[in-house]
Structure formats: structure tokens, C-alpha cells
Amino acid sequence: MENPPLFIYSPRYIQFDYGRDHPLRLFRLKLAVDLMEHYGLLSPPVEKAKPEEIDDETLLTFHDPSYLETLKKADEEGIPYPSMGLGNSDNPVFPGMYTLSRLVVGGTMVGTLKALEGRRVFHIGGGMHHARPSKAEGFCYLNDIVIALKDALNKGAKVLYLDIDAHHCDAVQEAFYEDPRVLVVSFHQYGPDTYPGTGALEELGEGEGKGYNLNLPLNRYTEDETLWWAYQELVPPLLEAFQPDLLFTQLGVDAHKDDPLTTLFLTTGFYERLAQDLASRWQGPWMAVGGGGYDMVNVARIWTLMWGIMVGKEVPDTLPESFLRISRMEGYDGPTIRDVPGWSGALSHVPKTLKPRVEFLKEHCPLLG
Ligand SMILES: [Zn+2]
């Protein structure tokens, strides 16, 4: 294989810990890696790479120097800095947080560079789409996505950024709001009590970037076929019309029906269909990062299924006993990697909620219509 797929992971990730009661458990990454290994998804021709901690100079392309200074200090001294979002329940101060975050940025940076050579790359540790230039937000301290995309832009690339995390990619939207070289597409839960509160349909970009920022707000309980319908209406035509140099996907899986933090209703079926569609449609550079996902068993199952599709390898239904032991402890009693198919066969929600929103986006995006 001329451009073999590349998987990026650091065993160091699980040495860090957000704290006992924090929903983001880094062990989910190891669980996913072990499952991928079981199915042979990390064996040749697939290549593997370990990230290096990124340097300060690169971080400064997005983050403020005073914030980096403070983040480093908070890490070393264990002291909270509330004005910079450091030390609250979402973004605790914990040993090694600066190192971990720099490793994550390093992974997404090198992955994006490799993807631009014409490869498919997955960095499950990446996807920190909430981190602001001078503030930690939503479990994210440094924004690996924005930093890597800025670098790709500097190399002349035009990017389609697709974010399927249950939460809106607020900091990515903000970074490229006036830039038509990054077409931002986000599907996310939206409502008065949903974090982060941005991501309205009407947030379409500004200036030259107007019409290049597409938000599809989702109601609670949005399920597979409703979102699949919307995906088909939007993403394939956008890929076709925009002709990006790089497809960059944030594959947060917290929109799964069993995720403890959200109330969307997707099953593994949706994630597989999406990956299959992109994989068959898109032969060019593809950088994928992880993101949210707070049920460890689901995270491992879904990312394994998606990576299987990205590398073109069939994943059988049966889960290994070692994985089942852990999943039983986590409360998952299904014996298979796939959920029971969730397709009801009726597009009951589409006309009521999503259709007018999709129509609105088609009217306001110069690439659609
Ligand atoms: Zn999320």
C-alpha cells in the first residue's frame, strides 16, 4: 500500500487522570486500542506512531502566551486559576495536564501533516474543540484542532471540517468564522440547557467566511435515521462542491444513545454508515480525531468500528472475552460490538424538526443549492 493508514496513540495518555469523579476517563483510549488490536486493525499495512509534546512556538499560533504560562504554573504548583477556566469541575488542575495537552496537540499536528500526504489518519486522543486562546473550556486545555488546521492552511490546504460530537465546536467555529478556506460543519445537540450554548443555525460565518460555517442544531432524542437523512442532504454535496484538500473529522461519540452526558439517540449503526459513506466517497487526505464520549465501552466499540471502515477491514460482531469482562463492570450487557439496529423505518422526526433547518442551510451556503 503506497499510503498506508496511520494510527496515532501514546501509551502515556493513560498515565494522566482528570480525577475520580470526572466524566472524561482516559482509560477509554486504551480500551479502544486494545479492541482495535484484537481485530487486527493496528497491524500492517496499518502504521502506528506515538506523538511528541508540541513546542511552545507552535502553541502560540493559537494560544495566548499568558495562558500558556499560567497553564504550566497550574500544572507545576497544583493551583487553580479560575479566570482562565483552570481548576473548576470541568477543567480540574491535575498533575501533568500541560504535558498531556501538549502530547495531544503533537499527535494531531503530526497526524494532519501525514494525512496531507494522502493518507487516512486517526488520533483518538485528539479533538479538543472547546479550548479557547486564553481559557480552558469543556475538558479541553489546548486546542489541537485549531492549531493543526492553521498549520494546514499555511501549507495551502483547503479543509472540510466535520464535527459530529454531541457538543458544538465553539472554539473551532470562532477561529475560522471569517475564513472560507475552512468549511466548518457541525451536528450537535442544541437547546437552552445544552453546553456550550453556541451553534445556532443562524451562525453562518462572517465576511468572506459567510456561508462557510454550517451548524445543524439537533433536538433531544434525534436518532439514527433522522440524522442520516440530514447527513446525506448536506455532507456529500458539500464534499463534491467544496473539493477540499483535507477532510478533517472530529469523531466525538457522545451523541450515542447511552452516553451519560447528552440526550441524543444514535446507535453504532449511524456511526458505521457515516464512516462507510465518507470512506467510499473520499479517497483524499483524511485526518480523524476523537472527542467526547463518556461511556467507555461505547467509545471503544464505535471508534473500533469506524477505524475498521477507514482501513477497509471487516470487524466481526463478536467481542473478545477480555473486553466483555470490562464492559460488564461498566454496565454494558450486549455481547456484540454493534448495537441492535435502531432503524425504525419511518422518518417521523424529519419533516417536523430537521427539514426546515436543512433547507435554511441550503439557502445560505453558496456551495449548496
Ligand atoms: Zn462532546
Image: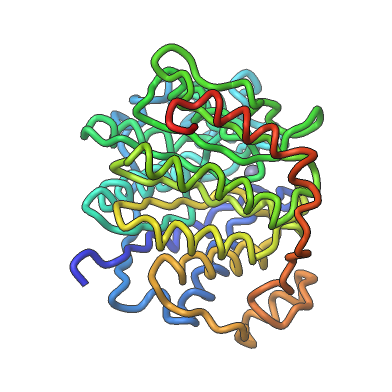
Q: Position of residue 41 (x, y in %)?
A: 42, 75
Q: Is residue 231 above or below residue 84?
A: below
* Colouring style: rainbow
Q: Nearer the viewer, residue 115 or 312?
A: 312
* Residue under the image location 33 percent in, 31 percent down: 150
Tell me if residue 67 can be seen: no
* Residue under the image location 62 percent in, 86 percent down: 318
**Viewed as shown, does residue 92 lie left or right of 114?**
right
Q: Nearer the viewer, residue 201 or 85?
A: 201
* Residue under the image location 74 percent in, 66 percent down: 342
**Viewed as shown, does residue 263 lie left or right of 308?**
right
Q: Position of residue 60 (x, y in %)?
A: 35, 25
Q: Is residue 335 above or below residue 25?
A: below
Q: Position of residue 96 (x, y in %)?
A: 50, 45
Quarter of the rendering containing residue 340: bottom right
Q: Quadrant of the N terminus?
A: bottom left
Q: Residue furthest top?
A: 207
Quadrant of ligand 1: it is: top right
* Residue under the image location 46 percent in, 35 percent down: 143
Tell me if residue 367 can be seen: yes
